[in-house]
Amino acid sequence: MSTNTTATARYLPGDIAVWLFIFAELTVFGILFIGFAVARSLNPEMFQTGHEVLHPILGLVNTAALITSSYFVATAVHQLRQRASGVEWRLWAALAVSCIYTVGKMWEYVDLYSQGYNLGTNTFFMFYFFLTFFHFMHVVLGQIILIALAVKVRSGEYDGSDMNGMESGACYWHMVDLVWLVLFPILYVLS
Amino acid sequence: MLMVYIALMVCTALPVFALQAGMGMEFLVWLVFVMIIIKAVLLVDHFMEMRNAPSAWRLTAQIWAPAIITVVAAFEAIT
């Protein structure tokens, strides 16, 4: 009896198709991270020199922003499931906090580009720009998803009766955060 | 949920404080690796709510960060 209860209580949050997409994305990022580690082991001096140009404090602020944003999204899902109030403002708050990341990242790109660094500078900057911009585009897509979720909550389309859409969007957003949690220390701390 | 958020922030700040306290890079590197794994597991289990997912899905989601970090750490050790 208790086994049946446990079995029925276990369920995958969100849509299975979104999860397959998430795992595909994580695989791509994983291959890129391993490529970065291999390239770094072949030329540690170049990676050390490149690393010194980056802004670790900005990276730290971006990490805090994405974690805070994920927290707002996670609590929004919880509130919607409980059919409690405060779902919409949490989603907008998540979006607002995540903008710290996007603005900070754009500032860093402009700063590095004005100093003459770009994709063709060397292997380190090829990885830096490719990895961070690839992640940046995922964040922008996640922000669009957050807007869509907030609009659907406001319109009453998402009222807690069906959590599939909300959970799918939230899991995508947390995946973006998960990738950054690995990307930030590898690029900004360890190099 | 708030406790998880606080734990994630502490894990993020800990290597920075350790660096300021004068911890050597050889230890800091491993501290960073451990913090990444802890944060990833917390995020997957609590924010993604995978603690209630079927075991195979949960394990697949949880194993990603440790697997990447293991490979990166192996190259770090070689370097």
Image (cartoon, grey):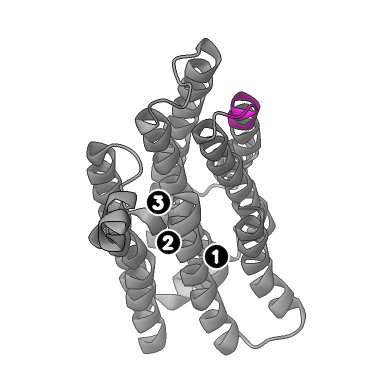
Please report, as a chain letter, where disc 3 is located: A
The secondary structure making up most of the magenta span is helix
Which residue is label 2 attached to? A124
User: Toward the viewer: B20 or A54?
Assistant: B20
* Residue A89 on the magenta span: yes
What residue is shown with label 1? A51
The relative height of residue A111 versus residue A96 in the rendered view (above or below) is below
Q: Earlier in the sequence, mark 2 or mark 1?
A: 1
Q: Which dot marks residue A131? A: 3
Q: Is residue A73 visible?
A: yes
Q: Residues within 10 Å of mark 3 (few under 14, many from 20)?
A: some
The answer to whether the residues at label 2 and label 1 have Cβ atoms under 8 Å apart is: yes
The percent position of residue A154, horizontal first and vertical second, equals: 55, 15
Residue positioned 60% across, 42% down in the render? A69
Can you say whether A82 is above or below A12 in the image? above
Q: Residue at x 45, y 34 (%)?
A: A142
Question: Would you say residue A94 sits in the magenta stretch?
Answer: no
The amino acid at mark 2 is Phe
Under mark 3, the amino acid is Leu
Query: Which chain is indicated by disc 2?
Result: A
* Same subunit, tags 2 and 1: yes
